[in-house]
Amino acid sequence: MNYSDSERVASLLEKLGYLRAEKWEDTDLFIFNTCSIRQKGEDRVFGQIENLDRLKRRNPRLLVGLTGCMVRSTSSRNSQKEIKDDLMKRVDTIDFVFKITESHKIGEVLAEAEPRLDLPELAEADLNDYLKINPKYTTKFQAFVPIQIGCDKYCTYCIVPYARGREQSRPMDEVLAECRALVEYGCKEITLVGQTVNSYGLSALDKTTQKFEGIKDPFVTLLTKLDALRELGLNRVRFTSPHPHDYTDALIQAHVDLPSLCQYFHLPIQSGNNDVLKKMNRKYTVEEYKTIIKKIRAKLPNAAITTDIIVGFCGETPEQFEDSDKLFKELRWDMAYISRYSARPGTVATKAFKDDVPHQEKARRWHKLNDILEECSLENHKRFEGKTVEVLVEKFNETTGECEGKSRENKVVQFKGNQELVGVIVDIKIIKGLSWLMKGEMKTA
Ligand code: 5AD
Ligand code: SF4
């Protein structure tokens, strides 16, 4: 989601006449697209902004702005509004902030922050709605396309519903038109992004707009229509993240029926204990989650399955944590994003429960799961040895002479290659599975 947002902001800045700087020191404008999921992310942003202070003293033209989940209102240091955003009050270096959903106001807020800037007016089409802004995609062959904003799930630990608002889906025609244009431009891999992509078209707000009336399963319908873009050169479709609560049999079947849809499932579990899941307001049980995995593995035994898991949630006992540990050993996810619980202001968990698992104990639990993850990841990578996978090459490293890309299962693969292979899909025979990646060699015809 954040990649996609940054690409949209970059596109507007380019229209305003900005160019991408090669070096930090040459930059006149920094915009931090922030994430408030965990405190660590926020701390990192403040650390980097502090570093910019030095640069600002050397370059008085330098402007620093912030957007993303940390920002709740759009304003600049010169705004007349009495109450400026808290972040500007806290950190002198910040000149302006804007809500990510108000990216289309970037020209206005920049001009207010620095009246000497002579910026062109943006076209009407760019000023309406932030999801309609055509992004400046980082690569020609891969793109992230947002299909919904906000989230209605209200997991008790999560800031997203407060930072991003109510769940709302983009009209299907608009998503398809953007994807079609991307594919015509040479895009081979599209990742649909949203907070809970598989409830696409089904939110309370979506129902009030009638945009999805009569469409039985909007997400599967969207995937099916996207699959037709294979004719124009689309090779891979991915999506992130779905919510287990809305994972239908039809969606699993779509992975079997639609050749473009990668056999890669990211299914956040968050905890292996039912009482903790309930307290998190996750709306499913461990048993229901396991049923989904069973169905996936029955139909697609080679699919990669990954997860998100939180350790040290409020009141999580050592025994409840052991349930997460046991479930990990049982399900052996290909990859997991493990996080230590971080209390977020304004969430139900912060108001109603105590963040009572000590810091050190959270670290112990994190390391324990991370050790299992490393073992599972190595084991899963070893299974690929001797097999051939399709790799979409993302980069070439001149120093090592190696290309790096991802297989359809989203596994990182490195092999000896050259710059010309970037953006190309190649068959790679896996020679060695390591903990976090696989090494292979290019098959010669
Ligand atoms: N503390 C720790 N991890 C969190 N996540 C979301 N909110 C928090 C929090 N307050 C994790 C969840 C989610 C992922 C994007 O971030 O695992 O799936
Ligand atoms: Fe946050 Fe839960 Fe929504 Fe995911 S589903 S964004 S964890 S509230």
Image (tube, helix red, strand yellow):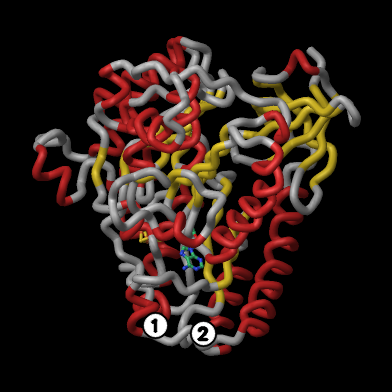
The quadrant of the rendering that contains the N terminus is top left
Q: Is residue 236 left or right of residue 249?
A: right
Identify which residue is drawn at 35% across, 50% down: 196
**On screen, residue 179 above or below 327:** above
**Mark 2–mark 1 CB contact (< 8 Å):** yes
Count residues near mark 2 (Cα–Cα under 10 Å), then give few for <14, some for 14-19, many for 20+: some
Instruction: Give x and y (percent) for residue 35.
Output: 49, 53
Amino acid type at circle 2 is: Gln
Identify which residue is drawn at 20% across, 49% down: 203
Tell me the quarter of the picture where residue 365 sits: bottom right
Instruction: Give x and y (percent) for residue 212.
Output: 15, 35
Observer-nearest of 156 and 303: 156
Instruction: Give x and y (percent) for residue 278.
Output: 35, 77
The residue where tag 2 is placed is 320
Identify which residue is drawn at 52% across, 13% down: 186
Identify which residue is drawn at 71% across, 47% down: 54
Mark 2 CB near ligand 1 (8 Å cut): no
Q: Secondary structure at mark 2?
A: helix
Q: Is residue 210 left or right of residue 64?
A: left
The residue where tag 1 is placed is 275
Amino acid type at circle 1 is: Asp
Q: Secondary structure at mark 1?
A: helix
